[in-house]
Amino acid sequence: MNTRLTAVLVLKDVLIEGRSLTEALTQHIPAGSESDIAFTKMLCFGTLRWYHKLDFWLNELLGHRLKPKDRDIEILLMLGIYQVAFSTKPDHACVNETVTVTRLLKKPWASKLVNGVLRNFLRKREALEGLADHSVATRFSFPAWLSDKLSGDYGEDTESLLASLQTQAPLTLRINRQAQTALEFKQHLQQNGLTFLEHPELDNAVTLMTPCNVEDIPGFYDGSCSVQDAAAQWCASLLHLQPGQRLLDACSAPGGKTAACLEMEPSLDVTAIDVDPKRQERTQENLTRLRLNANVLSANAADTHTWWNGHLFDRILLDVPCSATGVIRRHPDIKVLRRQSDIQALQKTQIALLEGLWPLLREGGHLLYSTCSLLSDENEQAVGAFLKQHPDAEHKPLPHIQGTVERPYGRQFLPQVGGHDGFYYALLCKRN
């Protein structure tokens, strides 16, 4: 397995074919040593995380772009520049190993080009870094449209927000209190040599100091815990769940929030629905692993006539499809795959889901609207537009939570270095 060649193939799928990074990695990474696989993933994640800065530098170094049929060589060049600029590998090794890949791509003519461009970057690195710093977008490696939108929403806090989105996200666990106490689980972590940080406000959340594979987490396959960001874990607390209530988890896959609610209140009568049958298979697998029960359905939640039996719900959790801008550090391909035109279409889907599911909520019931977005268009603007059309909908303020800011409607979680992702919640109550 040549790690750099595999990384080029993965990045081609993302940048040219428009596939997600997760899908491309699954497609191209063969069985191999853990170190090779980890290095390949590091190259792919890192190149996409810094893609817009790398692309800017490549423009400066090339003068003119290569023909479309040689886009793989441009990707290889960005991969090489990333290694020189951001990895700990010696510069000469980064250059030589990258040049070698031209022959594996059956384009030996490109060897001199790749060698020359990378050595030119080494000579001009300081000047090129200064040029990139002139723009906030290229300094933090974001598409200009997204940098501008975030600047419009966050003003003087934009740069610290972009910087936090360029850091590596931590591995946070949700302890299944139906399987053991939080104290027992933490003791098991310590006995297995895993160090962690306790969450200051969530008793069931712990963040591992060093990320690891789930098979190394004690009791994971027996249902002792789940991997879930701390911001997402707040859903169960904010819903004010009571024994025996009927809960609808719309857009539920892969089941993390469904499970969090059932772990908090096992007597809930839960319907978990999602439009993607494959992802719903994962929902059922996760519930089975955690020994939890729900009615798992695959359908478009907004098309209620295809699945709803007419019984009203006490609680609705609506985690809508969104731009996922709050989880960019986990999925850096979002920055190259998402388009500005997507936001308006997503907002239409979000409001359509609100409109379609609101009649299913009983009077006095609560609907918790959530996204993993940082954009006001998808968050408070979408909720505000819905409230204007529904006088029977009342916005309920949420409690103060560390790392969040209050919005006109709801509360925005801002991504924290070493902490939770970007997330948004708004709680709506149906008036009697």
Image: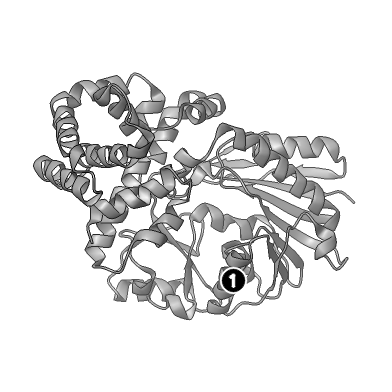
Vertical relation: 315 (above or below) 408: below
Quarter assignment of residue 293: bottom right
In terms of secondary structure, where does tag 1 sit? helix
Quarter assignment of residue 374: top right
Q: Colour scheme of this structure image? A: one colour
Q: Residue at x 47, y 81 (%)?
A: 222
Q: Is residue 361 visible?
A: no
Q: Is residue 66 visible?
A: yes
In the displayed structure, does residue 44 sit left or right of residue 293? left
Q: Position of residue 69 (x, y in %)?
A: 36, 38
In the displayed structure, does residue 390 sit left or right of residue 48? right
Vertical relation: 92 (above or below) 36: above
* Amino acid type at image mark 1: Glu
Q: Closest to the observer: 42 or 240?
A: 42
Q: Residue at x 68, y 60 (%)?
A: 275
In the displayed structure, does residue 178 sit left or right of residue 358? left
- Neighbourhood count class around disc 1 (C-alpha, 10 Å): few under 14, some 14–19, many 20 upward: some
Quarter assignment of residue 215: bottom left
* Quadrant, the N terminus: bottom left
Q: Residue at x 61, y 77 (%)?
A: 292
Vertical relation: 53 (above or below) 412: above
Read off the residue under disc 1.
Answer: 281
Q: Position of residue 233 (x, y in %)?
A: 55, 58
User: Please, which residue is most extreme toward the right here?
Assistant: 432
Q: Position of residue 324 (x, y in %)?
A: 54, 45
Q: Residue at x 24, y 25 (%)?
A: 61
Q: Closest to the observer: 20 or 146?
A: 20
Q: Closest to the observer: 64 or 313?
A: 64
Q: Position of residue 41 (x, y in %)?
A: 32, 54
Q: How many marks?
A: 1
